[in-house]
Image: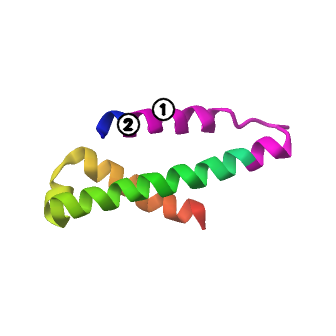
Amino acid sequence: FNRGVEALIVANTTMQACEHHHMPSALGDAINLGSFVFNVVFLLEMGLKLLAYGMQGYWKDNFNKLDGIVCLFSIFDMA
């Protein structure tokens, strides 16, 4: 599970790195769509971990704290 999430993080970072000045609108649209899909997947991952570990268990882990904060901020990015 963790390796799969790590692979998604690398794919998301790579996709975000493709954004550049004067890029075609189709590429911008694809990046926006991909960003939305990755955000939904990462929010689902957070939800599954919250169900598995409980609120207190989830927030005990420092990586989950970082992951959770990034996921919560991604909600604002999608709005």
SS type, badge 1: helix
Q: Which residue is mark 2?
A: 4
Say whether residue 56 is left or right of residue 43: left
Q: Residues within 10 Å of mark 1 (few under 14, many from 20)?
A: few
Three-letter amino acid code at the position of disc 2: Gly
Relative to 41, does residue 18 appear above or below in the rendering? above
Q: Residues within 10 Å of mark 2 (few under 14, many from 20)?
A: few
In percent of width and height, residue 41 lies at 46, 53
Real-space Cα separation, disc 2 to disc 1, in angstroms: 10 Å
Q: Main SS of the magenta segment? A: helix
The magenta region covers 5-29
Residue under the point 30% across and 40% down: 1
Q: Is residue 27 magenta?
A: yes
Say which quarter of the image contains residue 55: bottom left
Say which quarter of the image contains residue 4: top left
In percent of width and height, residue 43 lies at 42, 58
Q: Which residue is mark 1?
A: 10
| 45 or 62: nearer the viewer | 45
| 75 or 51: nearer the viewer | 51
Say which quarter of the image contains residue 50: bottom left
Residue under the point 30% across and 38% down: 2
Relative to 72, does residue 17 appear above or below in the rendering? above
